[in-house]
Amino acid sequence: MPDYQISVILPVYNAKAVLPRALESLQRQTLGFAQLEVLLADDCSTDGSWELVQQYARQYPNVRALQTPGNSGSASVPRNLAMAQAAAPYLMFLDNDDTFAPDGCAALLREMQASGADLVTGYFRDVLPDQTPINDRSPSCAVTEARKVYEFPRDYAIMHEVRQIFWCKLYKTALVRASGLSFKPGSNMEDVLFLARYLMACQTMVFCNVPVYNYTVSPDSLSHLCDTRYLQHRAEDIEELRRIYTEAGHPDCFDRQCPADADHYVSLIFTSDRIAAPAARLALLAPCRP
């Protein structure tokens, strides 16, 4: 088997129209496409995506086609399937409707190899489905220093600066496996929970002021997609986030980032088009009451 530098985990579901764009962004990587192991994990698509995934695997020796036993309804199961088979020493994650910036993989890998950090991150920008930029840098990316080093546990107090940026990070495969990490099936915050667990296992993290990821913002906002079940699951995920930090001995990490997560949760309750009854909204607010 070739010695790949990075395994790229890419879950696929009904993405036939956008998957070529994601793959093209990998082919344009300055690191070199052949240095990437591309794990396309299909979640039993119904639009021909699985056939396209298999076509890519036949066409490119570094692309592997994987498929879940049945549709799981989230990115967690296909990500776990691919992650378990990753052969490279480092991991990156790409969603099927997003793209990597051309130097994203190379920039993070250079820093990882030079510093030996447990986690290296850049920043991302938001784009429309046609890839028109909404901004040059997402508001979620608060750090603008050329390079910033975090030492844990000392700097857990400020790790929230980059905690939410799940996609544009380079992870160590060995650390993921040694820590027994996976994505929670059925979760609405599976990426946030995974990153929180990974951070609790880290000793060092480095932020590099480089663009890594283009995040596609759907025209269908969450206010049109959130129903009662979605929001109940989100409340459960916020509680699990609290448990992760508390059990790791760092409940203060949750105290610092909880307000942002809770504010977002409450805003979804009151903006969702799928929850019209006041009583239903009040019931969803129950977990927020002291």
Image (cartoon, rainbow, N blue to C red):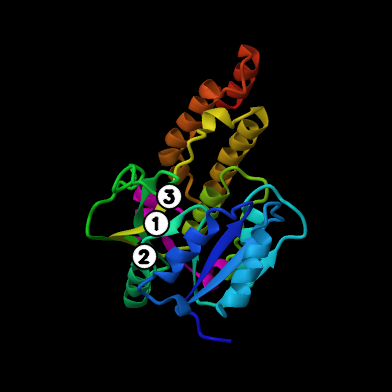
Residue beneath the point at 70% across and 63% down: 67
Disc 3 residue type (three-letter): Tyr
Q: Are discs 3 and 1 less than 8 Å apart at CB?
A: yes
Instruction: Tell whether 190 sits left or right of 259.
Output: right
Q: Which mark is first along the chain, 2 or 3?
A: 2
Residue 257 % position (x, y): 43, 40
Quarter where residue 48 is shown: bottom right
Tell which residue pokes out farthest to the top in this image.
Answer: 278
- Secondary structure category for the residue under label 1: strand
- Secondary structure category for the residue under label 3: strand
Question: Rounded to the nearest whole Å, what is the CA distance between mark 3 and mark 1?
Answer: 6 Å
Does the magenta segment cover residue 164?
Answer: yes
**Which residue matches tag 2?**
104
Name above or below for residue 3 compared with residue 176.
below
Residue 280 % position (x, y): 65, 18
Q: Are discs 3 and 2 less than 8 Å apart at CB?
A: no
Question: Rounded to the nearest whole Å, what is the CA distance between mark 3 and mark 2?
Answer: 13 Å
Q: Tell me if mark 2 has few (under 14), some (14-19) or many (20+) residues whose alpha carbon lies within 10 angstroms of its own.
A: many
Q: Are discs 2 and 1 less than 8 Å apart at CB?
A: yes
Name above or below for residue 151 compared with residue 196.
below
Residue beneath the point at 46% across and 65% down: 24
**Which residue matches tag 1?**
213
Quarter where residue 112 is shown: bottom left
Residue beneath the point at 59% across and 41% down: 237
Q: Tell me if mark 3 has few (under 14), some (14-19) or many (20+) residues whose alpha carbon lies within 10 angstroms of its own.
A: many
**Which residue matches tag 3?**
215
Residue beneath the point at 33% across and 48% down: 141
Viewer-nearest residue: 35 or 115 = 35
Does the magenta segment cover residue 143?
Answer: no
Q: Give the range drawn in magenta.
A: 151-176
Residue 249 % position (x, y): 51, 51
